Amino acid sequence: MGKIVALANQKGGVGKTTTAINLAANLAIMGKKILLVDADPQANATSGLGFDIKNEGIYECIIGKRNADEVILKSEDVKKLHVLPSSINLVGADAELATLQDGHFRLKKVLDPLREAYDYIFIDCSPSLGYTTVNALVAADSVLIPVQCGYFALEGLGKLLNTIKMVKSKLNTALDIEGFVMTMYSRSRLANQVTFEVKEHFKHLTYETIIVRSVRLDEAPSHGLPVILHDAASSGSKCYVELAKEFLKRNRKKKNEQ
Ligand code: ADP
Ligand code: MG
């Protein structure tokens, strides 16, 4: 049964989508069957993997107009990587979900039947803690939290953790924190200090792998490719290969402990 992991942080521009795309792609290249669910109306994960953002996708599934298997797209570049795309249609979902009695559970109902077909399902959340993101936290087994190595890194994490706590207590008791991933690292006293603080605070939940700032990572989406197919030798690509390995290692360990 596949595990569902939401990538969340209500701050924009911290590396959620970059991490979602490249972690998903590397795991697929390593042989895992992966579904990447784009839960952001900006649809950056969809376009960043070269797909048209005008397709029907997650929004149509959430409102019950389509089944997931009707809208899931298969990557031509990475076998074993499938995408449940997003579009601007998703912009109204928060308001619509709020009017539904099962409004917190719509995405869970879409994704649960897909667990059998995949090893991992990643949900790339939007920079908000609205209804759609709460749907992702309700659907997920765990949350992976990208944290940008900068001055305001820790700002807002409290609010995110409170939201996770609320979801855990009321809507999804099994929700776990997968971990914190430091992103966009460039050597400086500030970046080192922020990394140190996150490690101090979140201990073993902080990933050893730190994602460096890399121009190739920034460029890759404009080619519709994960960075490993854009420039495998780049520092950014190597970081995400390491991250995928660490992700698998941590999950193997968790399974053994169960
Ligand atoms: P989010 O999904 O959290 O809003 P993104 O992953 O879209 O964040 O990243 C924000 C911007 O920063 C994007 O333009 C992306 O290409 C760029 N970016 C993300 N990670 C890196 C990195 N490690 N090095 C360089 N640019 C990055
Ligand atoms: Mg994003």
Image (spheres, rainbow, N blue to C red):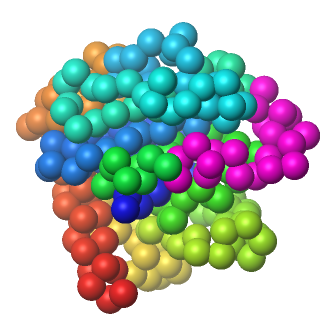
User: Quadrant of the rendered structure where residue 126 is?
Assistant: top right
Q: Position of residue 107 (x, y in %)?
A: 63, 45
- State the image coordinates of residue 228 (x, y, percent, origin top left): 17, 35
Q: Which quadrant is the N terminus positioned in? A: bottom left
Q: Which residue, as the protein is rendered here, is positioned at the far right?
A: 99
Residue 118 colored magenta?
A: no
- Considering every residue shown, the one lying at the far left of the view is 233
Residue at 54 percent of width and 10 percent of height = 54
- Find the residue positioned furthest to the bottom: 257
Asked if residue 102 is among those painted magenta in the image, a careful observer would answer yes
In-front residue for pair 239/59: 59
Q: Residue at x 36, y 87 (%)?
A: 258
The boundaries of the magenta stretch are: 92-112
63 on left or right of 33: right
In the rendered view, would you say 36 is above or below 51?
A: below
Q: Residue at x 40, y 32 (%)?
A: 83
Looking at the image, residue 18 lies above or below residue 1: above
